[in-house]
Amino acid sequence: MDSEPVLFALEGSQEFGQAVASQLGVSLATHEDRAFEDGEHKSRPLQNLRGRDVYVLHTLFGEEALSVNDKLLRLLFFIATVKDAGAKRVSALLPYLAYARKDRRAKSQDPVTTRYVAQLFEAMGVDCIVALEVHNQGAFDNAFRCRTVHLEAHSLFVNALIDRIGNEPVVIVSPDAGGTKRVDRFRDAWAGVAGEQPPTAFLEKRRTDGKITGDAVVGDMTGKVAIIVDDMVASGTTLLRAAEACKNKGATRVFGVITHALFGPGSEQLYRAGAMDQLFITDSVTPQQEPGAQGRVATIAVAGLFAQAVRELHTD
C-alpha cells in the first residue's frame, strides 16, 4: 500500500502502542474515548480512514480499571467503527489474546471460547489477527477464517538467556506433556542462535486417587541448566512444581521462560525454597502483581515483533 499504516492503541495499551509506533517511525493515530453515566462507552477515530490500512492494538488481559470483557467489547466495537469509516483493511494487534485457553471441549456442553471469540472478531469485519504466543497455535489458526499471524518471542528469549548462561549445558523443559511442541520450537530457535540443538525433557503428572501428587521427569537434566518454557503463568503453581522437580533431578540451575506473565494471587510462591533462579517474561501484559523477587525477573520487550509484522502486512 502506498501510504503509511495507521496505528491505534486503545485505553490501557497506549504505552505498548507507542513503542510499536516508534519502531515503525509513525505517530499513534488519535481517537476519542467517551464514557457515559449508564456504563456504556464510545470510541471514535479522529482522522479520515477511507482507503487506509489500519492496525488496532489492544492487549486483552483483565485489570482493575478494565475487565477483559470491557477491553474485548471496546476493541470489537472500534474495529467495526473503523471498518464503517471506510478503512481498506483492518488488522487487530493482540499482545495477549483472551479466552484462548479454552480451545476444545473437556466435558459435555463445554464452551469453546476460542472459536466464539474468533466469530465475534469476524462479525466486526476484521481482516487479520496478529497475536503473540497463543496457547494452542493450531486451534488459533483453525478458529479464524480470516488471516492470522502468530508471533513468537523465542529468539529474543534465547539471546537473553545465552547472555546469562554462557556455554553451560542446557536442557529445554516443558512443564507438561502438552507443551512439547512449544519446547521443540524453542529448541529450534536456540539452535538458530547457538548453532546446536539442546536436549529436551518434559514433566508427566503423577496422580493418586485422582489427585496430582508429583511430577515424573522424562529426560535427563543432571548437571544441566534447566530452562522451563511455557506460554503463561498465573498462580505459578505449575511452574514452581516443575522447577522443584528439575532441581530434584539434578539440574544445576532453573530458569523460567514465560511469554505472558499474569502473576495473579499466589505467584509469590515462585521463589519458595530457591527452586527458580530467574524468570524471563515479555511485556505483553502488565502483571497483576510482582512475584516479590527483586532482580529475579527479566522483562523482554516485544514491540519490535509487532512492528515487523505491520511492515510485512502493509507491504503485502
Image (spheres, helix red, strand yellow):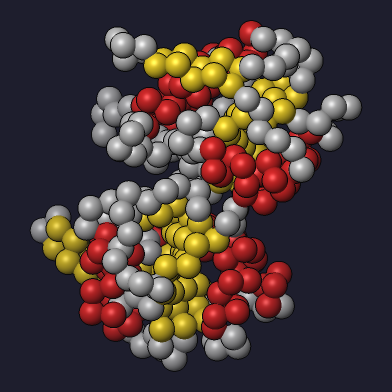
Quarter of the figure that contains the C terminus: top right
Residue 203 visible (yes or no): yes
Quarter of image, res 71: top left
Q: Position of residue 230 (x, y in %)?
A: 44, 59
Q: Which residue occupies the foreground of this view, 21 or 197?
A: 21
Specify whether 30 is left or right of 137: right
Residue furthest bottom as drawn = 223
Q: Which residue is rendered at x = 29% and y = 29% of the image? A: 110
Q: Which residue is rendered at x = 39% and y = 16% of the image? A: 35
Q: Which residue occupies the foreground of this view, 1 or 10?
A: 10
88 up-or-down from 186: above or below: above
Quarter of image, res 6: top right
Residue 205 visible (yes or no): no
Q: Position of residue 72 (x, y in %)?
A: 44, 26
Q: Which residue is rendered at x = 70% and y = 72% of the image? A: 193
Quarter of the figure that contains the N terminus: top right
Q: Which residue is rendered at x = 40% and y = 60% of the image? A: 177
6 up-or-down from 219: above or below: above
Q: Which residue occupies the foreground of this view, 144 or 282?
A: 282
Specify whether 118 is left or right of 17: left
Quarter of image, res 205: bottom left
Q: Position of residue 111 (x, y in %)?
A: 33, 27
Specify whether 1 is left or right of 47: right
Q: Position of residue 108 (x, y in %)?
A: 26, 29
